[in-house]
Image (spheres, rainbow, N blue to C red):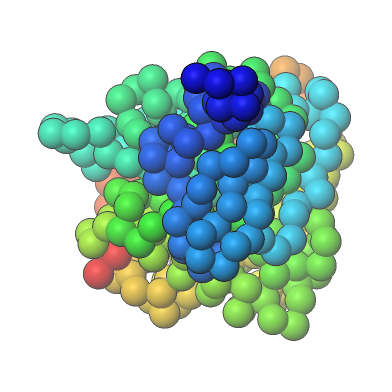
């Protein structure tokens, strides 16, 4: 191997979680997010052999973002809370759910976390035997180097996924859709909010194999208060939510947007154990204010109570849909 060849090989192994760029292409099944053409690994970047677009690295991670980026906060205290919260969510909700969907899988089910944030869910699911991959287009990616398997994380926008058709068994996200089709990081929807959310739903369904699952979670539009947005840490005053607002989504909203993309009916899932309330449990005030919410989560998650899960008494919904 001559000096130039050696330098090129070294550049492919540049800071990408210990996995060369060309190996990452095949391991994660990456394609061009613009035209879905074949990507070629070059020093510190990918180039599409179809449309000739070039994608560089950001912070040592492949940056395949097409379209907008999400400018979320990067405060270290918030990021640490996000890591702890995501670990609790993955251990107590995502992992049991996916093990129930594939109790005796003959091969590792392939999962895509859309808007994976800190990447904790991808790491934990990978350790549980799932072929998990995560994408995000925000600033929580700053903590990705902390992940043991951060080679499974990349920058991408959910409306332009860099994966082939029919390549995942499930795509899931938590509180991502309310932030699609809005003005900045606000609760004001853009005029084309429906088109933007359909674009993301279409991409999530496109990359699923037939029979694959979409699982989405967010505050319930029919609940009169939004207890998950617009609050400062330590405050328990909820934001009033008008059901006429398009910021949040209901079970029916998810069913309509994903039906256009090719899924069947929406199934509202139990919500118990989705939230660990790990921050509110640190104070008496938080425990008291959180008690009614925890009770509702418990109630609507009981067998036979599925009809209540999308109703105005439930502040949080988890919806599952299956590709036709």
Q: Could you tell me residue 80's position as x and y percent?
A: 72, 22
Horizontal side, residue 149 vs residue 93: left or right: right
| Snapshot quadrant of residue 207 | bottom left
State the residue in front, 66 or 281: 66
Q: Is residue 272 visible?
A: no
Looking at the image, is 34 positioned above or below residue 104?
A: below
Looking at the image, is 149 positioned above or below residue 222?
A: above
Residue in the picture at 69% in, 81% down: 192
Looking at the image, is 208 positioned above or below residue 287?
A: below
Residue in the picture at 46% in, 62% down: 37
| Snapshot quadrant of residue 239 | bottom right
How many marks the image carries: the answer is 0
Looking at the image, is 268 positioned above or below residue 200?
A: above
Q: Could you tell me residue 259's position as x and y percent?
A: 38, 76
Horizontal side, residue 246 vs residue 10: left or right: right
State the residue in front, 214 or 308: 214
Q: Could you tell me residue 81's position as x and y percent?
A: 71, 25
Q: Which residue ends up furthest to the bottom in the rendered image? A: 191
| Snapshot quadrant of residue 65 | bottom right
Q: Is residue 259 visible?
A: yes
Residue in the picture at 30% in, 58% down: 166
State the residue in front, 136 or 188: 136
Residue in the picture at 13% in, 34% down: 106
Of the 4 image quadrants, the one containing the C terminus is bottom left
Q: Could you tell me residue 226's position as x and y percent?
A: 71, 55
State the residue in front, 254 or 13: 13
């Amino acid at each position: 191997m001559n000096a130039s060849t050696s330098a090129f090989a070294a550049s492919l192994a540049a800071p990408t979680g210990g996995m060369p760029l060309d190996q990452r292409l095949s391991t994660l099944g990456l394609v061009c997010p613009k035209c879905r053409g074949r990507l070629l690994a070059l020093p510190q970047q990918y180039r599409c052999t179809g449309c000739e677009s070039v994608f560089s690295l950001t912070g040592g991670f492949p940056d395949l973002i097409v379209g907008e980026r999400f400018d979320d906060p990067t405060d270290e205290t918030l990021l640490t809370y996000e890591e702890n919260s995501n670990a609790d969510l993955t251990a107590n909700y995502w992992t049991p759910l996916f093990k129930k969907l594939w109790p005796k899988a003959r091969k590792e089910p392939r999962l895509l976390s859309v808007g994976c944030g800190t990447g904790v869910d991808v790491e934990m699911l990978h350790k549980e035997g799932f072929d998990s991959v995560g994408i995000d287009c925000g600033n929580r990616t700053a903590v990705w180097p902390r992940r043991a398997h951060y080679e499974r994380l990349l920058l991408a926008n959910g409306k332009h996924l860099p994966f082939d058709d029919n390549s995942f068994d499930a795509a899931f996200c938590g509180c991502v859709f309310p932030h699609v089709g809005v003005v900045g990081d606000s609760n004001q929807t853009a005029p084309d909010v429906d088109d933007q959310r359909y674009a993301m739903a279409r991409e999530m369904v496109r990359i699923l194999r037939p029979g694959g699952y979409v699982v989405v979670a967010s505050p319930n539009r029919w609940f009169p208060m939004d207890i998950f947005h617009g609050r400062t840490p330590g405050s328990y005053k909820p934001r009033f939510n008008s059901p006429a607002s398009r910021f949040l989504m209901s079970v029916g909203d998810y069913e309509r947007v994903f039906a256009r993309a090719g899924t069947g009916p929406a199934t509202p899932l139990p919500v118990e154990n989705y939230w660990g309330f790990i921050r509110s449990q640190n104070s008496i005030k938080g425990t008291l204010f959180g008690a009614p919410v925890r009770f509702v989560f418990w109630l609507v998650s009981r067998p036979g109570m599925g009809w209540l899960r999308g109703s105005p008494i439930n502040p949080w919904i988890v919806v599952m849909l299956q590709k036709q």
